[in-house]
Every structure is written in C-alpha cells, then in structure tokens.
Amino acid sequence: MDENRVIPLLPLRGMLVFPGMIINLDVGRDRSIKAVESAMAIDRKILLVTQREAGTIEPSENDLFTYGVIAEIKQLLKLPNGALRILVEGLSRAKIESVRDNKDIYFEAEVLEVPSIIDDSNEVEALKRMLIETFEQWILASKKITSEVLLTFKDQPDPGRIADMIAGYLTIGIDEKESVLEAINVKDRMNLLYSYLCKELEIANIEKNISQQVRKQIEQNQREYYLREQMKAINKELGEGDERQAEVDEYKRAMAELDMPEEVVEKIKKELDRLYKMPPMMAESAVIRSYLDALLSLPWNKFTEDNFDLKLAKKILNEDHYGLEKVKKRILEYLAVRALTKQIKGPILCLVGPPGVGKTSLARSIAKAINRKFTRISLGGVRDEAEIRGHRRTYIGAMPGRIIHGMQTCGCSNPVFLLDEVDKMNADFRGDPA
C-alpha cells in the first residue's frame, strides 16, 4: 500500500463515483468550488466522497462515508451562475484517515490508496462471466441504458474494474453502492454485486410484465373505444343507435339506484349488452325488456323493521276481531316464538274456515301488529303452475309469477304474504299447481 497523502475533498450528494468511471459533476457550494480550484492548481487530483444524507447542506467528517475515490479533473467549465461543471475520471479507491478544514476555505483529507486484492481463481472468472451475462439481461429487461455499454468492458481483463463499472450503471441505493466500493477483495465485491444485480433483474422483469399488461389493457380499451365509435357512426346513419343507447343508459340509471346483489348486477349488465347489440325489431328484445323491467321493479334489500310487541299485537287483534280466542292465542304464540328465536325460517300459519269468518282480515291485523306491509294473492281457479311460478322467458309475453307480482306490489322484501283460496286451485292432467 502507498503512503498517506493529503488532497482536496469534494463531498457528493446522492451519487457515488467508482474507479474507471468518467462523469460530469456540477459543483455549486462555495467550499466545493474552492476545493476544485485548489486541485486544479496542484495536480488536478481530488477525492470524491459521498455524503450519508443527501439533504445535508454543510457536511462534517461524520456526514461522509469512510471510503471515496481519488479522481482526476479532465475538464473544467465555468457556468454563468457562478457554479462549475467538471469532467472527472475515477482512478483508485481510497480510505479516509482524517478530514481537516483548510483555513475554513475547503475540506482536505488525509487518505490511503487501497488497491484491489485480486484472486486469479476459476471462481473469479466464473463470477465475471455471470456478472456480464446477468447485466446484459438487466439491460434488455430495464431498457434504462443502451446495450452499447457492454462493449466498453466486455474485453476488460480486470474483473475488479468490470464489477466497478457495472455497479456504476446499476440503479441500486447509495448504501449498496458504498458497500461495493468498500469491498477491497475482488471476489467479495463480485459476489456482493451479483446478489444486487439478481435482485435488480427480478424487479426489472416484474416492471416489464406490469408494463406489458398495462399496455395490452390500454390497447384493448382503445380498440373497444374505436369500435364503439364506429358502431355509433353506423347506427347514426341507420337512425338506430341514439335511441337504444338512451334506453340502455336509462336501465343503468335505474340499476344504480337499487341495492342489488353482485350476481344480479352482472346478469343485468349481460342482458343490457345483448339488448344493445340486438336489432330493434327482433321479438327477443321485447322479452329482454320485460325481464329487465321485472328485475328492476323488485324491492331489492328493502326491509321494514319488525315490532314484536305482544301487548300491542293482542290489542290490535282484539280491536279488529271479536271472539276467535283460540285463533288469536295461536297467532300470539307464533309471534312470541318469532320474537325469541329471531329466525326468518319457521312454520307457515294456515287459516281454515268458511267464507266471511275473517281469515284475510286476521292476516292484515298480523301485518299491522308487527309493523310489516301486507300483500295478498288469490289462487282461486289457478290451473297452471306457471301463473304462480312465472312463465319461461322463451314465451312471447312471458310474465313473472303471482308471488313475484305480489313482491312488486308491496315494495318491500319482508311483507306478510297471504296465499288466499289455496283449496280452490285446480289439478288436472296438465299439472298440479299445489
């Protein structure tokens, strides 16, 4: 190792120079300008040391890393704002022994040049080849620098110099670059750099995949937009598109106002897409409209709050009906069980008796007592189960069943639902609605 030498010190912010690098630096701080001028006056040699924190305006010895690079100033240019632009070439690593203030004008450092420890083993040669190959892959994946850079050091015999040049181009942090600079043993330096390079390659590949996905999505969106605009233009010429688009928009507005389950929203969107693409005179478009109207008229997630006050229920039942003590007692028992279990599922009450004894009005009183809406459908004379369940959508003029119609009429999802005249349903060879 050489003897200690004293040279002017230039602190760098947010960057690090390696031996072998040729780079432009802008110098603006007064002390830094004085250090450059002093170096130019002596032998053009200057020590480049990186600050630990880039935000430190006036660094002290503790704010600097312990290793730097002795560089030669190749060119100096004075800028109009008083700053300097210098072209420097990194020459060799140097360890800082001490930093002192030269008459409060600039920093100078007592440094010890540290040559690299080179091991001529096959392992170093293998690491060198791996580094060059992985760096080539990183260049292709990241596209942050041109592939011509490889030509500058592919034939470089010194493996330590190759590691330094690759570290200079990598977009790793200052702390990681400093650890490479401080690795005096070339094998250790290459191992360390290879681990950083593999990590950067993985990040670059992930970035590339994300970029390709985003680009593909944008291209798809642009293609769809272009095709839609073409469709609009064609429909405008045919005089069709505006009305259909307005109709679809109207359905979407109605859908946005309802609190529907996700699968129902998806189903409606699918049907709207079919409706928009379908010629307006096609019979099936009427079927789709009827289906959408039925779905949008249902009271999705609209509930009334129950009031299981048994005293109030008893009072209402007594006010509305004279006598019928057994029936009213059974209804109150049913309400008491519902109030205790808080369950939706349970037995269905069946009211039996001749016409006019108050079966329907009892159901209405139950609804009034527990603060629910009341809806009634009459099943007298129903022969076809499709009237209750609803027709298949393939029929022209298909309608929802009576139960769905009852839900539409009452406007809430938990009414007291009365199925009236169950005994008057007809069964024949065509089916049994019951």
Image: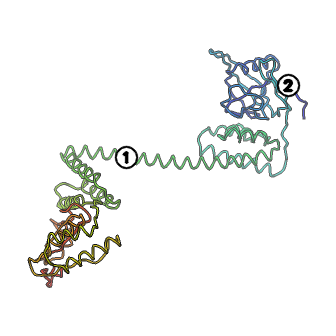
Q: Position of residue 343 (x, y in %)?
A: 34, 71
Q: Nearer the viewer, residue 143 or 419?
A: 419
Circles 1 and 2, Cβ within 8 Å, touching? The answer is no
Element marked by disc 1: helix
Q: How is the image coloured?
A: rainbow
Q: Position of residue 140 (x, y in %)?
A: 60, 44
Q: Which residue is mark 2?
A: 6
Q: Position of residue 173 (x, y in %)?
A: 67, 40
- Residue 35 image-quadrant placement: top right
Q: Name above or below for residue 196 compared with residue 323.
A: above
Q: Nearer the viewer, residue 279 or 303?
A: 303
* 107 to the left or right of 204: right
Labels 1 and 2: the sequence-earlier one: 2
Q: Position of residue 279 (x, y in %)?
A: 20, 55
* 360 to the left or right of 177: left
Q: Specify the quadrant that holds the C terminus.
A: bottom left
In whole angstroms, how far apart are the C-alphas of marks 1 and 2?
66 Å
What's the residue at 85%, 25% (across, down)?
A: 6
Q: Amino acid at mark 1?
A: Arg
- Residue that sits furthest to the bottom in the current view: 429
Q: Name above or below for residue 107 compared with residue 216.
A: above
What's the residue at 14%, 70% (across, down)?
A: 320
- Residue 39 image-quadrant placement: top right
Q: Amino acid at mark 2?
A: Val
Q: Name above or below for residue 34 compared with residue 62.
A: above
Element marked by disc 2: strand
- Between tags 1 and 2, which lies in front? 2
Q: Specify the quadrant that holds the N terminus.
A: top right
- Residue 66 image-quadrant placement: top right
Q: Which mark is residue 243?
A: none
The total of numbered circles placed on residues is: 2
Q: Which residue is mark 1?
A: 223
